[in-house]
Amino acid sequence: MDVLAVPADRHKGWYLSLMAPNTKGPTFAWLDPSRLYCNSQALADCVKDLVSPFHNDTIDLVAGIDAMGFILGASVATTLGKGFLAVRKAGHLCVATQNQNYTDYTGREKTMEVRLDVLKPGVRVLLVDQWIETGGTMKAAIQLVEQLGATVVGVAAVAIENTEGGKWIKENYKFSHCIPEELQSQIDQKYLNSFKSFKN
Ligand SMILES: O=P(O)(O)OC[C@H]1O[C@H](OP(=O)(O)OP(=O)(O)O)[C@H](O)[C@@H]1O
Ligand SMILES: Nc1ncnc2[nH]cnc12
């Protein structure tokens, strides 16, 4: 499929077929949703799917996780008419921060941080990231929001894998993702059938 083309039939999750398979080996993330962001209709439909369960919720702020979560997070924020808060990997914010250590799908220990001057009791936050695999990254972001006394309204990502951490998030927080039920097992196996006909 031409990456910028919009099909006549935009069935649920149609834009997932724009995702690119991993050609770089196991050191890299296994699937690449960023290709779908190049297609304006795909990006719009993806964001619409992510915000749809939250239309009746009070949300003060959308927080996106460094780095790819900034793309969807900022798009979700604009769609909802809310501001955007960057949750960053440590070392990039030159202001006072709250820090949280975590381990992600790489198995490496990392640190996430958020500025201290925005989150406080009463602030209701929608957390957005590109992908949830082990859930370590999202859990760290949840902890940062909650440590500062703010409330996590929900969690949104293109995909939430059915790992222990992914399931923990689904059981404990309101969530949204873009994966139709029949594709979830392909996501968990990190291989979409659409890759068979994928052309660069
Ligand atoms: O559920 P986990 O196992 O914690 O993994 C999920 C995280 O991994 C990916 O980002 P990555 O850290 O690769 O960086 P990027 O956003 O800069 O591509 C993804 O966008 C999430 O942030
Ligand atoms: N884009 C991605 N695809 C598959 N697994 C991931 N883990 C973290 N990011 C991922």
Image (cartoon, rainbow, N blue to C red):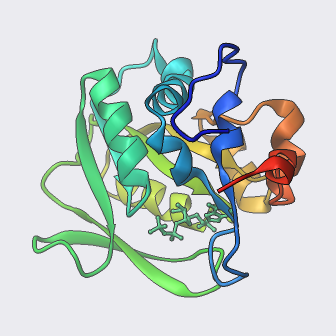
Relative to 182, say whether 52 is above or below.
above
Residue 181 position (above or below residue 88) = above
- In percent of width and height, residue 179 lies at 73, 36
| Residue sitting at x 17%, y 48% | 118
Q: Is residue 184 left or right of residue 146?
A: right
Q: Which residue is more in the foreground, 113 or 194? A: 194
The location of residue 197, given as percent across then percent down, is 82, 48
Query: Quick check: 44 above or below 191?
Result: above
Task: Judge whether 100 appears above or below 176 on screen.
Answer: below
Instruction: Determine which quarter of the picture holds residue 111.
Output: bottom left
| Relative to 169, 113 lies left or right | left
- Which quarter of the rendering shows the C terminus? bottom right
Q: Residue at x 71, y 60 (%)?
A: 165
Tell me which residue sits at (84%, 39%) in the image: 183
Q: How many numbered tags mark residues here?
A: 0
Residue 183 or 200: which is nearer the viewer? 200
Which residue is outermost to the bottom? 108
Q: Quadrant of the N terminus?
A: top right
Can you give x and y, in whole percent of width and height, for residue 6 in the image? 57, 24
In front: 24, or 90?
24
Ligand 2 quadrant in view: bottom right
